[in-house]
Image: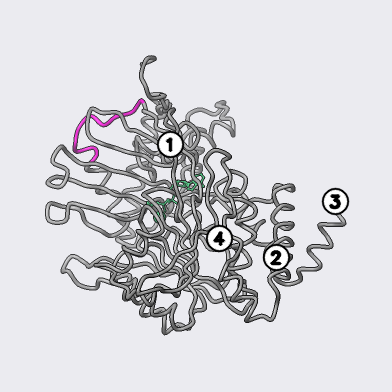
Amino acid sequence: MKDDILPQYEVIKQNYTPEEKILLGEMRENLVDIAMSTGENYQVSEGKLLTDIRNFLYLRLSGNGPNRNISNDYLNDLSQRFLRDIVGYGEIDPLIQDDELEEIMIIGTGKPIFVYHRQYGMMKTNIHFKDEQEIRDLIDTIARQINRRIDQESPILDGRLMDGSRVNATIPPVSPDGPSLTVRKFRRDPLTIIDLINSKTISLDLAGFLWLCIDGLGVKSANAIISGGTSSGKTTTLNALSAFINPNERIITIEDTLELQIPHEHVIRMETRPPNVEGKGELTMNDLVKNSLRQRPDRIIVGEVRADEAITLFTALNTGHSGFGTLHSNDARETITRLTNEPMSVPEIMIQAINFIIMQNRIYTPSGVSFRRISEVAEVVGMEEGTVQLNKIFQWNPERDLIENVSITSSTLQQIGNLSGKTITDLQSEIENRKIVLKHMINQNIRSVDGVNSVIELYYKDPQKVLNRIILNR
Ligand SMILES: Nc1ncnc2c1ncn2[C@@H]1O[C@H](COP(=O)(O)OP(=O)(O)OP(=O)(O)O)[C@@H](O)[C@H]1O
Ligand SMILES: [Mg+2]
């Protein structure tokens, strides 16, 4: 394996002693009994289950002889391992538990399971499935957990695991070589705007500028589409930028699978629903966007804009709501082309409601490791001869690895100035102040969702107090 081009990811397999194996078997039988007696409503809480397992093990092990000494560590460790065995995802469970993995890919029997590691890139694991039924069982377990079905008639499963990870599974006939499963791991500790500045995905200047525009000083909050290729980090950037939304706004998020983790208190999360087995009860993205308009939102966030919900979203943006969304495309112009053509079909004139197209890029290095950058921010500045006009205001310079400000004017800033009675110089100095706050968080290593959110909230409440405190601390 040493000369393999991909690094190896070693999973340490569970090795139970013969006694432990017997205990695990007994434990399983007990659980089946409990599940059967409580009927279909049997819901396991992991915490409760862990206590039950521990109690069971304690009784059984200490019952094996009066002088038997069972250490607490052993008991805790074994209970944990049993728990994972019972409620986990079998062989791939250690992969699901590892927060350093971005993606888990099962491509068939007899082939290793691949993973994408946040630090090392693509890796091969030492585990593989021997027969197709094992993969099918795993996919069926996942489908059952989310009340979906996967069979010959509907051979694709799109959904999420209990921990929030996104899954996509296929079975023949769509994947004729056998079942496949891809898991996009959910980050338990999400990347914040401070992480994105630290990793150079966004620059401090751009973050300060966007903070002011997204807030709009209460007179005009900016609308933005975050655009880019698959897995380029669109949702992550959207999520991180959402921290800048003024905490007094009422936010509604609409997604196919819940991914966004907006730190604000006042958020309503909505998720689409596929049709049931009889083909009824479907709730599309468009249904939810339409419905959200009756919920008096200030800000509508659409996870991924793809189809006819685009026109509903743009109608909302044109009638005074503000909004964010992500979209698949390769550059700013293509974003507009995609929005204005089938199946989104947004009339060009309505496109003017967005202020920024933020292009997100994933760049691969020869070693197979990738990094993410905001490659461009284009501002929508109006229409000329029936075509939307774009003005590039920030651009990533690959040589310097820096996102540079390439335009002296921003019409969004101008608008905010006009509506708030402030000069551009006033606004520039407000941006500088917000950069001081961001810089402070970087220096103090305040990077968690809660940490960042509370500083931003404080700033909204009393900016001068926050600035004074930072200056005093220097
Ligand atoms: N700036 C970043 N730095 C490091 N890792 C990142 C960054 N942005 C995203 N990631 C990681 O990359 C993966 C994909 O990110 P994300 O879901 O945001 O991409 P996406 O463009 O929305 O993907 P999709 O096309 O599937 O919607 C996630 O595991 C995420 O944690
Ligand atoms: Mg996404």
Does dot 3 land on a helix, a strand or a loop? Answer: loop
Return the disc, 1 or 4, that comes first in the chain's sequence: 4
Tell me the CA gap for discs 3 and 2.
Answer: 23 Å
On the image, numbered disc 2 is attached to which residue?
428
Return the disc, 3 or 4, that comes first in the chain's sequence: 4
Outermost residue toward the front?
A: 385
On the image, numbered disc 3 is attached to which residue?
474
Q: Where, by quadrant of the figure, is residue 345 drawn? A: bottom left
Residue type highlighted by circle 4: Leu
Mark 2 and ligand 1: say if the CB distance to the nearest ligand atom is below 8 Å.
Answer: no
Q: Where, by quadrant of the figure, is residue 281 drawn? A: bottom left
Does dot 2 land on a helix, a strand or a loop? Answer: helix
Q: Are marks 3 and 2 in contact (CB under 8 Å)?
A: no
Tell me the CA gap for discs 2 and 4.
Answer: 19 Å
Residue type highlighted by circle 3: Arg
Query: From what the image shows, is residue 152 above or below residue 122?
Result: below
Q: Residues within 10 Å of mark 1 (few under 14, many from 20)?
A: few
